[in-house]
Structures are given as structure tokens and as C-alpha cells.
Image: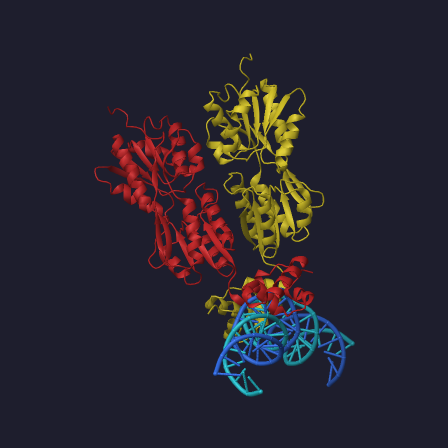
Chain colours: A red, B yellow, C blue, D cyan
Amino acid sequence: MPVTIRDVAKASGVHVSTVSRTFSAPHLVNAETRSRVLAVAERLGYRPNRAARSLTTGRTGNIGLIVADLADPFFPPLIKAAQAAARRQDYHLFVADTDENPAEEEELILAFSKQVDGIVLCSPRLPNKALEKLAKRVPFVLVNRRIRGLTTVVMDVAQGARAAMAHLMGLGHRRIAVVTGPSGSWTGGEIRKAVTETPDADTVVIGPHRPTEEGGSAVAARVAESGVTGVLAYNDLVAIGLIEGLAGLGVSVPGDISVIGFDDSVTGRLYRPRLTTVAMPAGDAGRMAVDLLVQSMSASTVLETHLVVRESTAPPKGSS
Amino acid sequence: MPVTIRDVAKASGVHVSTVSRTFSAPHLVNAETRSRVLAVAERLGYRPNRAARSLTTGRTGNIGLIVADLADPFFPPLIKAAQAAARRQDYHLFVADTDENPAEEEELILAFSKQVDGIVLCSPRLPNKALEKLAKRVPFVLVNRRIRGLTTVVMDVAQGARAAMAHLMGLGHRRIAVVTGPSGSWTGGEIRKAVTETPDADTVVIGPHRPTEEGGSAVAARVAESGVTGVLAYNDLVAIGLIEGLAGLGVSVPGDISVIGFDDSVTGRLYRPRLTTVAMPAGDAGRMAVDLLVQSMSASTVLETHLVVRESTAPPKGSS
DNA sequence: AAAGAGTCTGCAAACGGTTGCGTTAGGGTG
DNA sequence: CACCCTAACGCAACCGTTTGCAGACTCTTT
């Protein structure tokens, strides 16, 4: 019932190979024949069967995109930009969600490996070793993870974290906590390192936890007890959860404790108090990742981040 | 280089058809042979090539999911549930985003039609006619759109809207605006109808607009001038944008105007004032849609909605 | 002991394209 | 006019898997 290349060939009086070529190598077929074939194809509603095509070419025309959590507002802008970039080059984008689960992540990569030409792996949770092994089965580019020899695009969160620390220190804060996210996260490590290595700061590390609102509110008590006056949270969601949790304990932000998030996500942008946060170029990263993938360039690019000062930070209480 | 069914066959001393059967029809092959083949396949790292399989079977093992806007927080829970349901039945889910653009929607459906076994079409913007025609090329199930003869799963937004109206009327409001979303939206129509048909209410319709925060703030002035004391907004994002816009005009919510959203999205849940909103069973819808699709049952199911009263609604000013 | 039934496996033809190679026709060159 | 070259197209093998058919074998049954 579906119309194949053979139907088009018959209807336009040429061989199937000619029809094939009018689509995949137009310059090899006479202009007149080509337009005739195209007209017939159009009339019959012919669409090339990508499965069949990929069988011979080995290419699928698909790109996989794997994220840790679709519901994390950090990802949608990245996904949308990636999809736009993919479609611009006649690729389709398949999105999957690992639910922050490394095992699921590996399973998805394996499952994708035969149906995509490459994978954009965002914020992976698998260890480097595992990723290096998987990279042999299917080309991929990593977002926010740096591994020697693999194509990566990372955001300079360390610089963002340092800017955030400078902001807090500038306001007079000295005792500062960093609330980290999931244990496999590269960005989490970068942030933690940048914080704990800040000179003249008295820092404490809290975590790891799920990088969600619940994760943030779950550590509110520990943050309150730790005696810190400033906090860097793994992302906006954690920051918001933390602020909510602190509010429940009668601790106000930024009155008693200043809180800084990461991502500058829409959820954070609309929250009250307006979140001071480190903006991440998620859309750029998504676009660049698929561009790198289709050019199968091996490169390593790092994108700038910047601090957005809003209302969740203030000088510590009692400072003049 | 990639290991095929033939490699497995050779290495385990059986014919390719036997290998094929151990995967696609295990009961047809001797238990002993089967385990031997499986062991070899495991050792060689064999993974069936889905493209080749789909060429003969006609099935791809993929399901497409098309949404209007991935960045709308209404969708991620739906997508995640759909993906979980798909994987549970060994399907893969391909997500795409139309950017609220009907032409793009049609293009995506066509592009998907050969690489998926069916499509879950969420909140379509295309007119019924177009959808009926497209439904002949590829099976799909509609979410939040009702068309005779097509499989649909809709949320009872009309009932939710009536509950919201009852809530406002109960608080004493009589002049009430409905801020609608995009013109092709079925839910928008349902809400509008439910509002304008409420007895004893003096209603005004404002819209259509893009269903985003910007869309909501853009109509703030018109809402303020309209003299209403209560508003039903197309979704939480629009409600929030509206509240922000009103605040910019010195109009407070719920002090001066009560606002109700739809979706009960995470963004709305974290916003201040806590949004009174109509909760939508998005996850249930996603799960049911793919279940209906794989069973290719033709059915029409409607899911309940319910009103969540929080802080964005109050009695009108001056009422006792 | 022969026939029938049932299991398991091999054989080979598809599925819908792509592509290297061969053929044909026409044009340019000496 | 013989030669080579090129453009356009046909031919057929191949990509990796499924599946209807048939053969081989074992086990019952009569």
C-alpha cells in the first residue's frame, strides 16, 4: 500500500536506480528526467523509507539526545535549540530521559546506538571509564562533561562559580555552603572545587542529592545548622527548594542567608525572591553539540557563563 | 565491523534464521540451542539492527510524540510518563516540538510517518480537517483534541473551568475575564465556552495569544481596563505573566483581581502568590496515549481535572 | 513396521532502497 | 573516420533481518 521507489519508477518509465539518484544524487540525472520523476513522486506522495535507506548507507539521519531529567527546566531550551539545529541539516532528533539513573543511561545509549548516527549526551552520570567504552560503539558528543579524546562542549561553570563566590565575598559573606547535586555530575564537581578553593572563605559541602526542589528543601535544616550565611546551590531548582525549606524553619532569604542558583531557568526567573543565579548558555550548547556531531569534528569547546544578580543575595546580617 | 546476525550464526554453528528466531520467536527454538545462541550473542555484543528488522516487518518499534512547546512546563511530565510507558513495551519514543506552528506540525507528522509506528499528538494546532487527512497516513492518538473517529484522550477542562468559575462566583466575583491561548487550541475553546456559558456571570474574552508568560503580561493592561475582578488564564504561564504585568500596573493579585491558571505546573506551584489552578492529569494522559497507541485500540477516554485553591484568589475588594 | 503428528532447523525469497559497474548514445578531437 | 571521453541510465548485488515452506528427526499410535 505505501508507495515505494519502484512505483515511482514504473509510473515515470525509468529504472529504480534513476529514481533513487534523483533523490540522493540529483546531479547524476538529466534535468528533464529529474523533474519528471519528481513530479510523479509528488503526485504519488512518495516519501523515501529511511529504514531501507539506512540499511545500505549505514546512516540513519537521526540524532539521539539524552538528558538526565526532562522536567528540569535547564534542559528544554537546550533541547529546542538542538532540535532546530538538527532539522536545519535534515536530521531528526530523538530525545530520551534517564531519570538521573546511570544504568538507564547506559541502556539508552546502547538502544540508540543502532538507530542514530550519533548521540548528544547531556550531563551524563556514568563514570568516565564507561563513557570511553561506549564511545567506541557510537559517536557522541558530551555536554557538560570533559573527557580526553572525546568531543565535548562544556559551560564554564567554574568561572561562574567563582563569580558567584566573588559576589558573596563582596557582600561580606565568609562562611559559605555549597549544596551539590547528583554524584556523577561534572558541573557539580566543578562548582564544589571552585567554592572550596576560594581563598579566605570558610566553606562547607552539603550533598550529594537529587537535583530537584525536594533535594533542596531536604537539606534546609543542615544548611541552617551549619551557620553559613551564604549558599551556592547546584541549580535553580535546588536553590528554590532550599529557600522554601529555610522559610519553613523561619530563616529568610536573603535576610538571614543569601542563596545563589545555577542555570537562570524560567522557573528561577519567576520565583520570589528573584533568584541570583549563574546563567548557562544552554541553547548555544545544544546547537553546538549537534553541529559538532554532524560534522563529526573532534573538538572541545567551552562556553562562557555569567552571574545574574537579583534578589536572593544580600549582605550578611549584622554587617554595617 | 558491527556484529550481525550472521556473525552470531557462524559462531554458534546454526543458521541465521535460528538466530533470528531466538530473538523474535523464542518458543520456536530448542531451549538448549537458544541459550547457546544467546550466550554467543552476548559475548559478541550483538544487538539486532532495528532498521533491517523494520524493513521486513513494517514495524519500527518507535513512537513519535509531538508537542507544541517543550519549554511549556505542562509537557515534561506528560513526556516522561509517555516515555516510561513506551519503554515498558519495548518501544522508543521520539519527541519533537512544533513551536506552536501548525505548518511545522504537519511537516513533523509527515517526516515521522515512515519512522514510527504511531504518533501521539499533544495539543495539536492543526484544524480537524487536516488532522483527519493525516490520520490516514499514520495512526495517531490525539491528546486534548476531540475528533470523531480518531482515538483521543482528553482532559475534562470544561469541568475544571466550571469548578474554577464556581470558586470565583462563590467568592463573590461576577465580572470575570477568560484569557485564551493559541487559536488552534481545543482546551482554550473548552475553557472559553465553559466560562461564557456560566449563568449569572458577566464575562469577557481576551485573546488569543501565545500561551507564554509574555502572552500573559501583554494583556495585563486590557485586563486591568476591563473592570473584571476575576480571571481564568489559559495556563499557569499565562496566569503568571498576567500577574506580573498587573503588578507592574499597580494592580495586586489577589487583592484587586483574582487569577486562576490551568495545569498545576511546577513553575506555577513555586510561584508567589501560590497559584490557584486547575490540575491536569498530564502524566496519566501521556501514559494512556501510548498504551492506546500500541494496542491500536480505537477509544476515546476523558480524564478528570480538579481545582487546586491556593493564594491567587480571594473575595473581590469591598465585599463583606 | 508404517503412518501420522509434532519439533526443530535450514533454505531462500522478500523488504526498499543504494551504488559500483557496464552499456549506450552523443560530442569533440586529430 | 577512428578514437576517446563524458553524460545518462540500466543492471544486479547487497545491506541485516524476518518468515513461509519444507526437510529431518523423534515420538506416538495403530
Q: Is residue A87 visible?
A: yes
In this view, the residue farthest toward the left is: A200
Image coords of residue A20 (percent x, y): 59, 66
Image coords of residue A292 (percent x, y): 41, 55
Image coords of residue A185 (percent x, y): 37, 48
User: In this orientation, which residue lies closer to the viewer: A163 or A72?
Assistant: A163
The residue positioned 57% from the left and 21% from the top of the image is B226
Count of marks, rendered view: 0
Q: Is residue A10 above or below residue C25?
A: above
Q: As drawn, is B140 to the left or to the right of A187?
A: right
Q: Is residue B87 visible?
A: no
The residue positioned 51% from the left and 21% from the top of the image is B254
The residue positioned 46% from the left and 47% from the top of the image is A81
Residue C13 lies in what quarter of the image?
bottom right
Residue A157 lies in what quarter of the image?
top left
Image coords of residue B214 (percent x, y): 50, 33
Q: As drawn, is B64 to the left or to the right of A108?
A: right
User: In this orientation, which residue lies closer to the viewer: B56 or D25?
Assistant: B56
Quadrant position of the C terminus of chain B in the picture: top right
